[in-house]
Image (cartoon, rainbow, N blue to C red):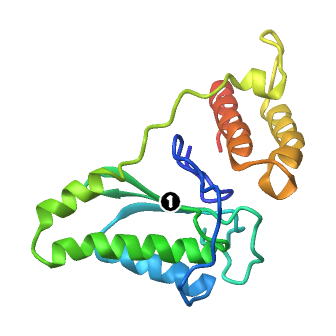
Amino acid sequence: MIEAYPLYWPEGRPRAKWQYDSPFKSTLGAARDGLFAELDRLCAKKVILSTNIPLRRDGLPYANASEPKDSGAAVYFEYKGKPMCFACDKYKRVWENLRAIEKTIDAIRGIERWGSSDMMERAFRGFTAIPETASEPWRNVFGFSATETVNADRIDDAFRKLAFTEHPDHGGTSERFQRIVNARTDARRAIGATA
């Protein structure tokens, strides 16, 4: 399941080996708002902005949050009924990666503004969200035996214990943390627990 926090990096998409300072001038709040404005102009639906910045009550990342270790950003949305994903981790700060995504969408939208909308459709096909792959069995991830009775509290306890070491801010990686997030979702679904 795609989540806004922590960062849900698109499966199968390689991460940047090196990170750079960008040529952009902005702040996190301005970059976030600029990206959402660009998505509005695109008429994107079901937008999920995913980063390692904690969320406000309205689900958006805090504009004044400190910079996380993993500065990657991904935005998931529907465009004309198709799932899309733009992700960037080329730059050292989250706002720089948000600005890069915004500028990329603006450039692709420019194709339509310049009268070649069929080219825009072809360009967007390259950003179709890759379907999620089958995840590892949740009992294996959390160390539960096949015959062990498990409830929502036990799942949440196992998740919290692993989250302490698997989260990128505690020495883990986004991929390892996403593994336990997927396991928690699968486990709760399997026992019939909600949210």
Screen quadrant of the N terminus: top right
Count residues near mark 1 (Cα–Cα under 10 Å), then give few for <14, some for 14-19, many for 20+: many
Residue 30 location, x and y as percent? 55, 87
The quarter of the displayed image where residue 160 is located:
top right
The quarter of the displayed image where residue 149 is located:
top right
- For image coordinates 40% across by 76% down, the residue present is 103
Question: Which residue, as the protein is rendered here, is positioned at the far bottom?
Answer: 25
Residue 170 location, x and y as percent? 87, 54
In this rendering, the answer to whether 109 lies above or below 24 is above
Residue 188 location, x and y as percent? 68, 33
Residue 151 location, x and y as percent? 80, 28
Comparing 65 with 176, the one in front is: 176
Question: Which residue, as the protein is rendered here, is positioned at the far top?
Answer: 147
- For image coordinates 65% across by 66% down, the residue present is 19
The residue under label 1 is 87
- For image coordinates 30% across by 77% down, the residue present is 41
Comparing 36 with 146, the one in front is: 36
Q: Is residue 128 left or right of residue 175?
A: left
- For image coordinates 66% across by 82% down, the residue present is 63
In this rendering, the answer to whether 72 lies above or below 155 is below
Specify the amino acid type for callout 1.
Ala
Q: Is residue 130 left or right of residue 74?
A: left
